[in-house]
Image: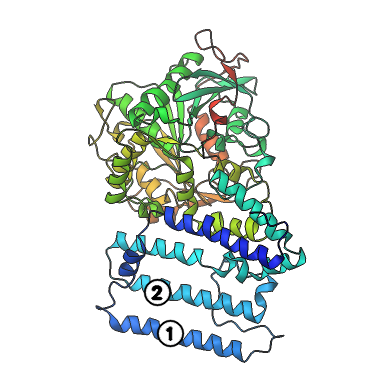
Amino acid sequence: MDTANKSPMEALAEFNRQLLLNVVKPLSRDSPGPGAPEFMQSLTAGVAQDAQRWFDIQNRYYQKQLELWTAFSSQPSDKALSNVVEAEAGDRRFRAPEWQQPYFSFIAQSYLLNARWLNEIVESAQLEPHAKKKLAFFARQYIDSISPANFAWSNPEALKLAAETRGDSLTQGLKNLAGDMDRGLVSMTDESAFEVGRNLAMTPGAVVYENDFMQLIQYRPSTDTVFERPLIMVPPCINKYYILDLQPDNSFVRYAVDAGHIVFMVSWRNMPQSMGKATWDDYLTRGVMPALDVAQAITGSEKVNALGFCVGGTLLSSALAVRRARGAGGVSSLTLLATMLDFFDTGELSVFIDQAYVTKREIDFADGGILPGRELALTFASLRANDLIWQYVVNNYLKGKTPAPFDLLYWNSDSTNLPGSMYSYYIRNMYLENNLCRSGKLKMCDVPVDLRRIDMPAYVLATRDDHIVPWKTAYASGRLLSGKVEFVLAASGHIAGVINSAARNRRNYWLGGKLPKDPDRWLQSAQSQPGSWWTHWSAWLAQHGGDRVPARNLLGTESYPQIEPAPGRYVKEKAPG
């Protein structure tokens, strides 16, 4: 990829070749969507049943393209081209002044017309709902991928920059591309700006317990007195725990510690190949349950408070249901953040998971093995491809820029591997068959699971724009619990809605009373509150914390001595490329 001695045009040609080989083709190949024949067959389904609608769509498309060509061919080169079609609100790809030049405006508008045409064809397809949803998703992936903004030869901003730098921007873009190909992901942030334990996951504490699945961190109190009942946090095992402990001003862990809670955190291991046969039950018996028991033993409290985020909440709820089936108690309250228990609507992730996909993964992992973290990262990124893939392709490769430092995106790129056996069980029994919400349908740890036996008070948080855990699904999940449920709906999405620091106090959240079956009815009567939901949760949790007692600076006990300072070894282990 040496372009140092090449002309700008040669560098451009080399860049385009590498982009096609290393970005466009892998994205197309690795996406678990339909192949070209299946895609076209699905796309044209229903034409015979509704030929008139097909002709109407075609006629509108041809008329608009003719109108655009007529405007372009008669437009003086020094005048802006009038808009025949407008980009959707929030689409920033064609806003720069360079796109207002007639030729590039023509390219952009022609692309937008093509996108509109394809979307209308998809909408007219006579398919059952899941197939249509899947078709719409992959049509959008295709539309996003062929945008003229994504290619150096059709992006006037990239061309202008290449001319101004005499090809240096393309040369640097190729270097950026080569580096990202080595790591297997498009860079979203300046990774050199962050280091776990230096400026991320900085809350003081120590690892006080570990096994081959997790480390348990106890954080040092920052107040003279603390609530007697500890708070155990169970993060998702598909990401690193420090999403809950980013930098001091947006650390949920630090906020809870400063509120007077004795906080423990599960730090899941980044699974090696040797752990590929680990099961869902193993995550309960070697992860969640020891965390609850060790925290209880260290603090000497009869009860604990427990919190789970995303799949961490699913694991936590499963463990509590198992404990209830065995007649065990000891949990004063439950907090679920963006968690699914009833998987009736899994949002856009459902397009990936059907019978064929699940069966294939079960065959793939029949003898163990791991699901690479990069595969999950690409799947999640594809849900918002323009925001999480293509804008970085444009900036990093076409323009040769280094992305700005952003702690949340650094965490997002710090992927983790999962055991294949556990993953296969999870996607079949939760995503595909929705068995967890059915009383007694599943056995975990040799006992039937019934979520309705989880009867402690619960704080259930959903986020309104969540594309991973739709808020109505989180709402339905909360209604499965038999204790008193405080349901709260936060603004924004899966991560930004949860990590909404009380110090910054942005956005808003909604509170309501009883939980009718219809979530829309709840929302109609709910009251909007300004700022972060953290303050409301803190007041709620204080009611379940027990008495205030003097804080102990010594972490762990003689039976559970300090192993190493927080954040520990496990969170620093990188998933192999």
Label 1, secondary structure: give it.
helix
The one of 300 and 562 positioned closer to us in this rendering:
562
Label 1 Cα crowd, 10 Å radius (few <14 / some 14-19 / many 20+): few
Callout 1 amino acid:
Arg
- For image coordinates 68% across by 34% down, the residue present is 199
| Residue sitting at the far top | 558
Q: Earlier in the sequence, mark 2 or mark 1?
A: 1
Residue 363 x, y percent position in the rendering: 29, 41
Q: Residue furthest bottom?
A: 74
- Name the residue rendered at 43%, 55% in the picture: 29
Q: CA distance from mark 2 to mark 1?
A: 11 Å
Amino acid carrying mark 2 in the image: Glu
User: Which residue is identified by label 2?
Assistant: 120
Q: Are marks 2 and 1 in contact (CB under 8 Å)?
A: yes
The residue sitting at the front extreme is 5
Give the residue pinned by disc 1: 60
